[in-house]
């Protein structure tokens, strides 16, 4: 949980609105996705759901990384 929160703060700083005028529109999906992950009780998930969640996290991370490189 603390890793997710620290990453969110890192990306909020990285994706500062001064870098890009459409900040709220472009990155809102990322913040919503991370917040959803943060609010998921993984103790309630079965193995298949955990594996799907892990794949989703990796996809999200790769997508964020691609866009980070675009706005450097």
Image (cartoon, rainbow, N blue to C red):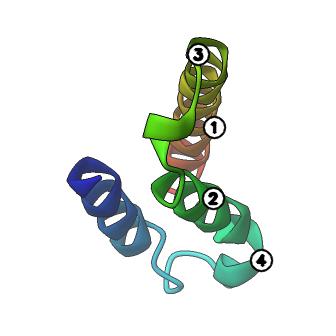
- Give the alpha-carbon distance from disc 4 to disc 2, as whole Å: 10 Å
- Locate residue 14 relative to residue 45 in the image: left or right: left
Label 4's element?
Answer: helix
Decide which of tag 4 and tag 1 comes sooner along the chain. Answer: 4
Residue 51 circle label: 3
Q: In the rendered image, which residue does mark 2 sit on?
A: 30
Q: Mark 4 points at which residue?
A: 25
Q: From what the image shows, is residue 55 above or below residue 13?
A: above
Q: In this view, does 34 lie to the left or right of 43?
A: right
Q: How far apart are marks 1 and 2 (CA)?
A: 9 Å
User: Residue 16 has which mark?
Assistant: none
Name the side, left or right, on which 58 lies relative to 9: right
Compare marks 4 and 2 and give the one earlier in the sequence: 4
- Read off the residue under disc 1: 63
User: Do the CB atoms of the residues marked 1 and 2 lie less than 8 Å apart?
Assistant: yes
Q: In 3D space, how far apart are the residues under numbered discs 1 and 3 (Cα atoms)?
A: 18 Å
Look at discs 3 and 2 and give the one toward the viewer: 3
Instruction: Using the rendered view, name the quadrant where residue 51 is placed.
Output: top right
């Amino acid at each position: 949980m603390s890793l997710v929160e620290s990453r969110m703060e890192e990306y909020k700083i990285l994706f500062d609105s001064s870098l890009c005028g459409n900040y709220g529109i472009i990155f809102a999906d990322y913040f919503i996705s991370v917040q959803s992950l943060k609010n998921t009780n993984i103790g309630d998930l079965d193995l298949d759901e955990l594996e799907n969640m892990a794949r989703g996290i990796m996809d999200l991370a790769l997508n964020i990384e691609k866009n980070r490189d675009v706005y450097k």
